[in-house]
Image (spheres, rainbow, N blue to C red):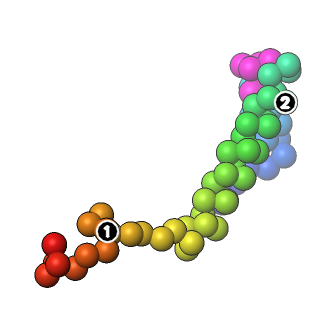
Amino acid sequence: MFGFGTPELLVIGAIVMLVFGAGKLPEIGSSFGKAIGNFKKAVDDKDQIEFSPKDGGKSGDEA
């Protein structure tokens, strides 16, 4: 899609390691994985959302 190959990914990884440090990488990876998981869960659950009317289900004639 963007033409990223192995050399480009290695350069990006090295830059990320310089910016955040080796100690922070597991924490960043974990939070990124959780974010992706939550996003996938939200996309899968979008069909299960139920909407209820604000007036308690009354029609326009009864309100």
- Which amino acid type is marked by label 1? Gly
Comparing 16 with 54, the one in front is 54
Q: Which mark is residue 56?
A: 1
Residue at 68% x, 45% y is 35
Where on the picture, by quarter, is residue 17? top right
Q: Badges 2 and 1: C-beta atoms under 8 Å apart?
A: no
Give the image location of residue 34, x and y in percent. 73, 44
Helix, strand or loop at label 2? It is helix
Q: Can I make out residue 62 in this image? A: yes
Q: Residue at x 67, y 60 (%)?
A: 41
Which residue is found at the position 31% from the left and 74% from the top?
57
- The residue that label 2 is drawn on is 26
Pinpoint residue 7: horizontal percent, then vertical percent: 82, 41
Q: Splitting the image into 4 quarters, where does residue 39 fall?
A: bottom right
Q: Is residue 45 left or right of residue 63?
A: right
Residue type (three-letter) at the residue carrying disc 2: Pro
Q: Magenta stretch: give its range.
A: 16-21
